[in-house]
Image (cartoon, rainbow, N blue to C red):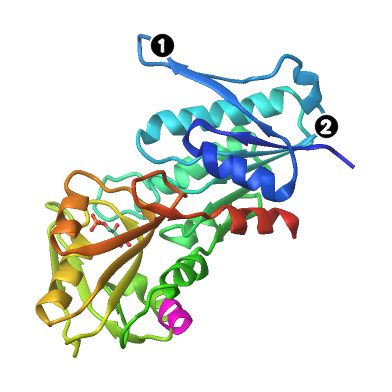
Amino acid sequence: MASKFIVAGPASQSVAVQVANLLEIPVVETEFKKFPDGENYIRLNVEDESIFNGSDMIIIQSADFPQNDHLMELFYLISIAKRVEAASIRVVVPYLAYSRQDKVFRPGEAISAKLILQMIVQAGANEFVTIDIHAPEVLSNLGIPATSLDSTPLLANYLKSRDLVNPVVISPDKGSRDRSAQFASLIGAELVLFDKSRDRITGEIDMEGEAELNGRDVAIVDDIIATGGTMATALGIAKNAGARNLYALCSHALLIGNALFKLSKLECEVIGTNAVNSPVSVVSVAPIIAKHFKE
Ligand code: R5P
């Protein structure tokens, strides 16, 4: 049987080690830096690269901020795996940057999500795995198997350990409805649908929604918390309606700018996964990644 290695990309060190431990296979450290002119450098920290010849290499590297650096490091890691003649190169990108640029919203735009995926394939990946991608349609027709793993049960299990009172799950927008319904059923909560619209140019959010929330615990689960605008708007409505405890759960806690401030002002608990490293990344996605590679 071919030997297997996990490569721990700079952006996903702890999750890579966790996956390697769960799969009981070696994990390879990387050495990385930026040259003074801004170019990225990365190498596998080994003395003898012939150990990778004919092996299965699983590269784990998220593409969170600084996303372009992390993507360049990922492309280099794939090209290294190809050069050392790995038999298969499986690429796990727990958070795929640019995933929200999945279609042409305004004339003259690039479909960046698709291009990034094509570059990963072009670099030499034989399989692509991510977590809760914003628009799963971009994974079609890549020419290699591509999967978006679902972290909803992990987040639901985490929240279930709280003593929830008459819980409600609010779906903040159309895109989050299926996932919110799944989450509500997993934690035994009522589902309430809100409607969000966003100005494509200013990014400003408008949200409508009503529900009987007095004294009830309210949870919202989304794929991404970026500026925190979506969560803060929906949870603000819930708070004004008399909700008791507020929970903001997400797969990818990007927490741009004042996101944590906005959510903290609402006294809301923010819960994310380690698909992205952040101060709220308390739920590990390692078990679902390991399970994927065991099957
Ligand atoms: C949008 O459709 C996504 O699912 C998230 O709701 C959005 O990306 C969150 O962004 P922000 O935190 O900036 O409102």
Residue 222 lies in quadrant: bottom left
Rounded to the nearest whole Å, what is the CA distance between mark 1 and mark 2?
32 Å
Q: Residues within 10 Å of mark 1 (few under 14, many from 20)?
A: few
Question: Which of the 4 quarters of the picture holds residue 70?
Answer: top left
Q: Ligand 1 falls in which quarter?
A: bottom left
Magenta residues, start to end: 182-187
Q: Is residue 166 left or right of residue 115?
A: left
Instruction: Locate the N terminus by quadrant.
Output: top right
Name which of mark 1 and mark 2 comes first in the sequence: 1
Label 1 is placed on what type of residue? Answer: Phe
Q: Residues within 10 Å of mark 2 (few under 14, many from 20)?
A: some
- Marker disc for residue 271: none
Residue 236 in picture, x, y percent from top left: 14, 70
Q: Is residue 256 left or right of residue 138?
A: left
Residue sitting at x 68%, y 50%: 22
Q: Is residue 80 left or right of residue 195?
A: right
The residue wearing badge 1 is 35
Residue 208 image position (x, y, % from top left): 15, 78
Q: Which mark is residue 54?
A: 2
- State whether residue 232 is above or below residue 8: below
Residue 102 in sight: no
User: Which is more toward the observer, 207 or 247?
Assistant: 247
Q: Residue furthest front?
A: 163
Q: Is residue 186 magenta?
A: yes
Q: Is mark 2 within 8 Å of ligand 1?
A: no
Q: Quadrant of the C terminus?
A: bottom right
